[in-house]
Image (tube, coloured by chain):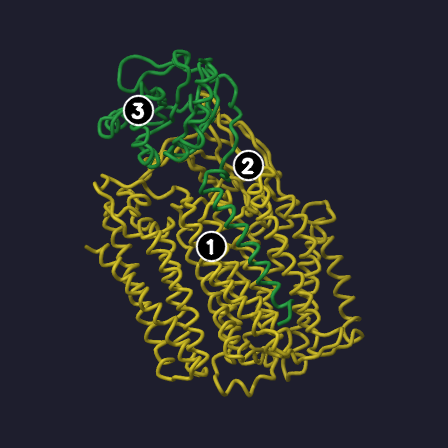
Amino acid sequence: MVPELGHFALILALVLAMVQGVVPLAGAATGRTHWMAVARPAAWGQFFFLALAYAGLTYAFVTNDFSVTYAAQNSNSQLPLIYRISAVWGGHEGSLLLWVAMMGLWTVAVGLFSRRLPVAMVARVIGVMGLVSSGFLLFMLLTSNPFDRIWPAPMDGRDLNPLLQDPGLVIHPPMLYMGYVGFSVAFAFAVAALLGGRLDAAWARWSRPWTTIAWAFLTLGIALGSWWAYYELGWGGWWFWDPVENASFIPWLVGIALMHSLAVSEKRGAFKSWTVLLAIFAFALSLLGTFLVRSGVLTSVHAFANDPARGVFILMLLGAVVGGSLLIYALRAPAVKSTGRFSLFSRETLLLGNNVLLAVAAGTILLGTLYPLVLDSLGVGKISVGPPYFNAVFVPLMIPLIFAMGIGPLTRWKRDRVNRLLPVLSVVLIVSAILGALLPWWLYGEVPAMAAVGAALSFWVLLTVLLDVHHRTRNAESTVAGLRKLTLSFWGMNLAHLGVAAAVLGVTFSTYFGEERDLRMAPGDSVEVAGLAFNFEGVDQRRGPNYVANTGVVRVTDGDRQVALMETEKRVYNVQGMPMTEAGIDAGLTRDLYVAMGEQLDDSGAWALRIYHKPFVRWIWLGGLLMALGGLLAASDRRYRLGRHGISERGENA
Amino acid sequence: MKTRFLAPLMIFGAMVGLFYFALMQIGQGDYNPRDIPSPLINQAAPAFDLPAVTSDGSVSSAVFAQHQVSLFNVWASWCVACRQEHPFLMDLARRGEVPIYGLNYKDERADAIQWLNRHGDPYVTSGFDLRGDVGIDWGVYGVPETFVIDGNGMVRYKHVGPLGPESWEKKMKPVIDRLKAESS
């Protein structure tokens, strides 16, 4: 009964989404206010029924109703309750429902926080979101209904993929989807502005907080995914350039470009048509990611059901959404005039550099991701494009980007003098270079060139941020008073930039100073890695709620002092019979110790063990956290909340 | 309309075209991104000697020499895709075109017998590979998989995933017809 209600709620949500997509847009086109007024109630109704459908599916999982095919494929009665709830988004159909429900939530948020916007603008934004939502609901109802029944019902379910039975993965997809779907708001604002012919500072200002929040969620999602891969896959890696990782990373990069280009469009009225294009691309690439993951055109560790019929439908959806918006762009953008002129050395120029570098980075990653598909489908041959390509193209683009990131916030809009900043910046650059060489030498006694470059870039960002804070507070009566006058968007920006510095340091040091050993160890064996003794104490059997495990114990000592007692597990899950590695990690701010069990080698009790020493690896995710936090801070700046009042204050700092 | 504003649309159109092309090829079975070519093709079938699932006897790789051509199908009761494939195998067995041998991969014997009782047994006989050792020798990385073995005990073709009327007609039957023609 409940699944049928859920199915019915989904159909009602589709009907309301279509109303929401058609009536307000038609109203805005013809100037009918009462048609435009349909936007909000329709959005709220749609969200209500989506929430109902979502609750219905969750009910089927919680009550172990395996007559629902989707529950039978992704859950099991032995599965702990928390994972039965998260298993709702563990497969294709349910994650699609989560996606659409979040889209409903974002639409409601737009409806609530846009009371001061012109009625026609709101009607267009909500209308565009309704159209996108209709497409996804149609896709779900026609090809991927999560409420389909199976008869006879299986005795028990096939269980959630053991890889997904993990706290990190419980929240990773929702965060990621919040980001993907959040870009639909920036997209809807861009299309609405094109339709209404209003590409002005107000449009850019309304788009900014939404874009920044969506990007912050995407950042958290990617960081969580990376952290999960690190401790769950048992390889100690945190980024694999897997097509599906790239599918989230490309919109993330475009999102950064968009945030910066929106700033220019708002403050200076320049880059407008480029900004609109970026807003379309950010969402288009999010949709593309969905397509790549679910259609099976690319091989990836993130395998969803591989069904060409679904692929064709998503492709049609992608074509309609992106093709339609690019067509509107082609028709309307030529009329857009960018007004702000700027000289060669100005903040605009540096942000232009930011956009060019990020767009090129996103483009090259997209190229590398699609290249195997192109060759393979043309029958040329099977190749895989891996980390060597991506590292080779990505790193050289990031170095100038981070260098420019230090200078950008210090420069003035429109026109600045090189002489004003050159003396102090050359000192900062020299100090950064010296510190960058000294830190690895002091910590590890050696200075590989790239490690010094990475560390120097981190110091460069840190010092320029401090310089910026100093510049902005030196004229205040006291430092404290000066600090208090700084805006949240200023703090947010700098926090996010510091996050980049932290991540760069983490990536650099864990890459250049990490130690990795793969060895055969019998109980009682000891090995020295990074100056610490790793003693393998043996293996015992344990039983979890839905798995059995061999638990290996490793005691780490430094001389006589015990540093850590680590446990690593090789689990076999009862239902799918799939072996899983749980790495033992002793986490620290300056280094992680990491132990993972491989296979049992013979009957004497010897196992293959992987032992890693990973300096500063935690800084990568710490950096991600800082970036997301910075984004949220910046988006909650008061000037976005003050409606009409705020517009008169537009002159203040970015 | 300036052409530079059309450029994004045109690039996007080209991408959609590529994806559509790739999807159509997947749909027709001409292209499978997961298709890793088996190194066993045109090599001797890896030898095995396993207890049979349903009887006290055993099954060995010698059985392949008894036929011009035979199929070796990897299955398990826990495998959802096998359930999808099963009716087609039953159909194939009824028509008697080619004998099918089974490899029951990493399964419980009671579950496997119950599965055959419930859905029917298309196999001449199935080997019981509890630990999956034979599966490793044969390079099985997903269930179901189906191998075509000729009368000399050589692996001639491998199909990954559930077999259906379309993949049978397009891929497997031509190989089998050719082998039958060669050996008669």
Identify which residue is drawn at 34% across, 21% down: B128
Residue A28: x %, y % from top left:
43, 80
Q: Do labels 3 and 1 share a chain?
A: no
Which residue does the numbered mark 2 point to in the structure image? A611
User: CA separation, marks 3 and 1?
Assistant: 39 Å
Query: Crowding near pointer 1: few (<14 within 10 Å), some, many (20+)?
Result: many
Quarter occupied by the N terminus of chain A: bottom left
Residue type at mark 3 is Arg
Look at chain A in the picture and name its colour. yellow
- The three-letter code of the residue at mark 2 reads Ile
State which quadrant residue A337 falls in.
Answer: bottom right
Q: Nearer the viewer, residue A263 or A439?
A: A263
Horizontal and vertical percent for residue A165? 38, 45
The residue wearing badge 1 is: A315
Whether residue B156 sits left or right of residue A479 in the image: it is left
The answer as to whether the residues below labels 2 and 1 share one chain is yes
Which is in the foreground here, disc 3 or disc 1?
3
| Letter of the chain that mark 3 sits on in the rendering | B
Q: Where is residue A648 in the image (x, y as percent from the top left)?
A: 55, 88
Q: Name the residue under label 3.
A: B95
Q: The green chain is which one?
A: B
Subunit that carries the residue with mark 1: A
Which quarter shows the C terminus of chain A?
bottom right
| Quarter where residue B87 is shown | top left
